[in-house]
Amino acid sequence: MRCRLQLLLGLYFILLSIASAAAATVAFINPGKHNELYWSTASSAMQDAAKQLGFSLEISYAQRDPLRAIEIARLIAARPAQNQPDYIIFSNDHGTGPEILKILAKTRSKTFLAFSTMATPQEREQTQGPRQKYPNWIGSLVPDAEQAGYLSAKQLLTAARQAQLYGPDRRLQVIAIAGDRSTPSSVLRNQGLQRAIAESPDAVLKQMVYAKWQQEKAAEQSRWLFARYPEARLVWSGSDMMAFGAMQSWEQAGGQVGKTAVFSAINTSPAAMAAIQNGRLSALAGGHHMNGAFALVMIYDYSHGLDFARESIELEAPMFGLISPQMAAKYQKKYGFHDFSQINFKAYSKYENPKNQKYVFTLASWLR
Amino acid sequence: MMRFPKFQSITRLLIRKIVWLAMLGALLVAAINAYTVFLQSEDHLFDTMTTIGAVYVPQLATSVWDIEPANVAATINGMVENNDNIGYVQLDLLSGYQFVAGQLSDVGRLPAKTFTLYEPGTTEHVIGSLKVYPNAKAFYQHLAFNLATSLLGYVLLTFLICQLVRWVLRQHLQKPLKEIAQFAQTLDAERLLTPLRLSNRENITPNEIDLVVAGFDTLQTELSRHINHLDQMVAERTTQLEAALASIQQLYITDPLTGCYNRHYLNNQLELIFASQAQQPISLIFCDIDFFKRINDTFGHKAGDEVLNRCGQILREGLRTDSDWVARFGGEEFLVVLPKTPLPEALQVAERLRLSIAALSFDFRQQAYSITASFGVAQQLDAENATQLCERADQLLYRAKHNGRNQVCSD
């Protein structure tokens, strides 16, 4: 029995080495949970892209535990050099980026930041930029998270104006349920909301709370907020799950979602797509789950000698877009089962398309 | 020291009194201290609670404002767990929520400190109130510990001071007093004038002890002077007394008119002489002035006294040795006692005395006259006593008178 297991393992390593000889290997340290919709969708898109681009992709989930993300990096660094992946994609969720970079600096792998990059001055000072303090850090690609917050807020205000949800002070009173205080993508979305409010003299942000991306916590906090601000009728959320939590509280308090109060969200989950179609959500922004897949496109070009540094080694690309009910219907039809194989990822490659001057990773480019 | 059945050294007494009084004082001070510590502790407790509140209240207000119930609960639990002074915390929010931590039973009867929670960044918008109750058990335990250590400190300090006082008293009081007491005890007549010298007094500024020593010195000097004076006086008085006594003795045994021994002396001495063998042989001479009554009658008693006086003088001066003596027997009769004298020598003495008396001349109003005396002489016979010898001598005197007077008769 034992003999057979060893034989199987031996065979597995032989196959693995043949595969690595044939294709470049990529590892992705996924900060989310494996059953969390957003992060599993992002993984699916990456797997489809890897398949098309000829990468062997290995995904590990940190299960939203910052220490676990660091632990995964340590495990990779502890492997023998020949078993270390050629490329490692990771995110700076909860400020784990600098530590992960430091750990992976000892490996032969090239590292690439996606989804969230170094945002605070301390992080920048600690890590400097790609290819400086840590030469194996080759670059980063992040979505325009600020734009996501801004677009969803703008659309939310428009919907509220149409529904005449002004308070006694003749202003649109907004409460915001944000993710957390430290993840750059969260901070940027909040900044987008604040920019939209600042542009609108008829709107006021009453308060922003942090629900840690959790539906239950969002429900509890919004319950308090609705009591604290009985005249607020606009609820902006940093994610779809938190928006659903707030809706739940609103309905418990006797309100009608989409009518007596309007809600906005960021994400492209089936539930969010359904909510924008049935009018429970008044604004929805999404598209950033493609970040990992587009990062693979940039690595594909890099591995073929076409360095993305010519455009930028730290790229912030407009990936977010507002999703209309029609677009939501189309998305569910095309990608409802997390199958992104219809997308031709090589079309985004500069190596494959020498005419392309810039990377175009917009929502419109794959959801038309 | 053995003179008293119960003796206690003054140093010991002082030390005991000091120890008791100091302990009493220490307890009193400790009690006052305890009371002030208690008051201060209460103040301090409420100050501490105010400080703790000032630290936690903004944090709690932020958590409440940010709607972080888990943080709120953790914070007030932390208040109780991390601060021994706090027994129970109750947070009441205006929204109706309530958070509590700790045990209400730990609070006792100590009052709560109430803080108001405001919306962060404002001072008007109240969002709730925080009641902080002190932990009575911890408070009283802490208080008891403080009081116990302070009491122990006082007692130790007092004990130390008492030991020092004891040492000083021993050094400066007990030792010299003991020496003085021993000196006073051993002071008898022989050593009365031995001076008192205390040991180890060289480097000490004189004090009462030295005054006592000086007093002893003065007393001894005075005493010595007084004793000398008394001795001198006693010697003087003794001499005077002896002189007076001698004079009285003389008067007692002497006949004042004649200067001869009196009958009383004669009676005493005669017995003593007769009893002594060394005085043998003894001869007696009885002498009687002839016609003395006629002289008295003719020339008066004053002339008679002069005759007696001059005769007595002749008899006393006419004796041979110091051992011979003469006594007035009575009236104009004299008895001459001659120890260690045989009859022939006694006859010679008597004869010489008869001639001396006959040679005397008297005058009364320019009329001269003379006198004579008759003598009876006898030597003691064997086994003859004084009375018998006197009787015999008297018989011989009578014969001399009878034979014509102015003559010496013997056997």
Image (spheres, coloured by chain):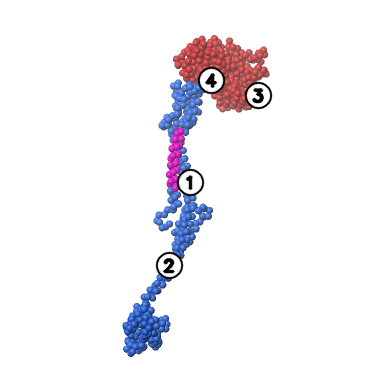
Chain colours: A red, B blue
Q: Earlier in the sequence, mark 4 or mark 3?
A: 3
| Amino acid identity at mark 4 | Gly
Q: Earlier in the sequence, mark 1 or mark 2?
A: 1
Q: CA distance from mark 1 to mark 4?
A: 69 Å
Q: Which residues are magenta?
A: B18-43
| Amino acid identity at mark 1 | Leu
Q: Which residue is mark 3?
A: A132
Q: Position of residue B31 (x, y in %)?
A: 43, 40
Q: CA distance from mark 3 to mark 2?
A: 132 Å
Q: Is residue A128 left or right of residue B48?
A: right
The answer to whether any part of residue A275 appears in the image is no
- Which element carries disc 1, helix, strand or loop? helix
Residue sitting at x 59%, y 16%? A144
Q: Which residue is mark 2?
A: B234
Q: Which residue is mark 1?
A: B160
Q: Residues within 10 Å of mark 4 (few under 14, many from 20)?
A: many
- Which element carries disc 2, helix, strand or loop? helix
The disc at residue B56 is none
| Amino acid identity at mark 3 | Gln
Q: Are marks 4 and 3 in contact (CB under 8 Å)?
A: no
Determine if marks 3 and 1 fall on one subunit.
no
Residue B339 or residue A221, whichever sits in front: B339
Q: What is the chain identity of the residue bearing mark 3?
A: A
Q: What is the chain identity of the residue bearing mark 4?
A: A
Determine if marks 4 and 2 fall on one subunit.
no
The reply to whether the magenta stretch includes residue B194 is: no
Q: Which residue is mark 4?
A: A179
Q: Position of residue B371 (x, y in %)?
A: 36, 85
- Which element carries disc 3, helix, strand or loop? loop
